[in-house]
Image (tube, rainbow, N blue to C red):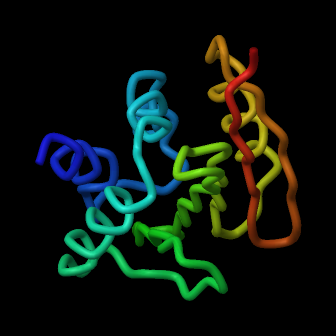
Amino acid sequence: MKKILFLCLIFISLKTNAIDSNKLINFNDLNILFDFKKNDWNENVLFLIKKNSFSIVDSNSDTFYLKSIFNDGQIITMPIFSNNIVEKIKFEYIFDYKKENLKILNDHFNSFNNFCFEYFQNDNSIQVDVSKCN
């Protein structure tokens, strides 16, 4: 139940923007996401899609992806599991691309210790791949 409430708090408001730097995932939330097991993640996503601001993204795997819908875009959260443990989390920020958005995301994610990040961008999205560094 604690994890369900956590996920609700991460993505709760429809009145926020997808790229508000003070609304982006924080270090503690990221640690909690990495603690999920595959079944727990899927159960929480099924619970959250009952809200209008969330939906499941079709994937070719047995893991559900969560799409959070905001005023100015969407964020898709895609955990990648290995042996039932989160190996990597992909966040895809979908919105009208602006150069300053990449800087906001880069500055935000690079402020976290113990996590490594890769960034990929195209005309309408930025994908951030997050993994734990050793």
* Residue 18 rendering spot, x and y as whole percentages: 49, 56
Could you tell whether 117 is left or right of 123 in the image? left
Could you tell whether 114 is left or right of 64 in the image? right
Total marks shown come to: 0
Most foreground residue, 133 or 96: 133
Location of residue 111 by image quarter: top right
Most foreground residue, 30 or 70: 30
* Residue 13 rendering spot, x and y as whole percentages: 25, 57
114 up-or-down from 18: above or below: above
* Residue 61 rendering spot, x and y as whole percentages: 62, 79
Could you tell whether 114 is left or right of 97 in the image? left
Q: Residue at x 23, y 44 (%)?
A: 3
132 up-or-down from 35: above or below: above
Could you tell whether 62 is left or right of 48 in the image? right
Q: Residue at x 86, y 59 (%)?
A: 121
Q: Residue furthest left?
A: 1
Q: Residue at x 32, y 56 (%)?
A: 40
* Residue 73 rendering spot, x and y as whole percentages: 53, 70
Q: Residue furthest front?
A: 83
* Quadrant containing the C terminus in the rendered view: top right
Location of residue 12 by image quarter: bottom left
Location of residue 114 by image quarter: top right
Most foreground residue, 19 or 121: 121
